[in-house]
Image (cartoon, grey):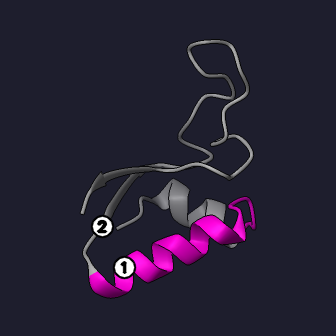
Amino acid sequence: MLDADGIKDIKAGRIDPRVVAVLTKLSGEHKITVTCMCSDHDKFTSGGSVSNHHFGRGMDIGAI
């Protein structure tokens, strides 16, 4: 399950194809809930580094 922001991120090509492939594989065998992708996340981590989410290389899975 993706929220509206996650769907927009994928459709806009902001999410790394490897992340999309993992989501596709997992969703074929499990019900998953993605709680955060690119648009849902701050650019920087709490430590000050640029987040992988910002580049479309990260996601948070809230439930499987």
x, y (%) of residue 12?
Answer: 73, 66
How many residues crowd mark 1 within 10 Å: few (<14), some (14–19), many (20+)?
A: some
- Determine the residue positioned at 61% across, 45% down: 39
Q: Residue furthest top?
A: 47
Name the amino acid, label 1.
Ser
Instruction: Tell me whether circle 1 and circle 2 mark residues in contact (CB < 8 Å).
Output: yes
Q: Is residue 62 above or below residue 24?
A: above
- The residue at 67%/40% (across/down) is 52
Q: Secondary structure at mark 1?
A: helix
Left or right of residue 53, residue 30 in this image: left
Q: Residue 60 location in percent, x, y?
A: 43, 47
The residue singled out by tag 1 in the image is 27
Q: Which residue is the site of mark 2?
A: 32
Q: Specify the segment rendered in magenta.
A: 12-29
In three-dimensional space, the C-alpha distance between marks 1 and 2, rounded to whole angstroms, equals 6 Å
Q: Is residue 53 magenta?
A: no
* Quadrant location, the C terminus: bottom left
State left or right for residue 36 relative to residue 46.
Answer: left
- Return the x and y of residue 47 as percentages of the image width and height: 61, 12
Q: Residue at x 38, y 76 (%)?
A: 26
| Percent of width and height locating residue 3 | 42, 58
Q: Earlier in the sequence, mark 1 or mark 2?
A: 1
Q: Magenta stretch: residue 23 in it?
A: yes
**Residue farthest along the bottom direction in this orientation:** 28
Query: Relative to the observer, which residue lies in front, 35 or 46?
Result: 46
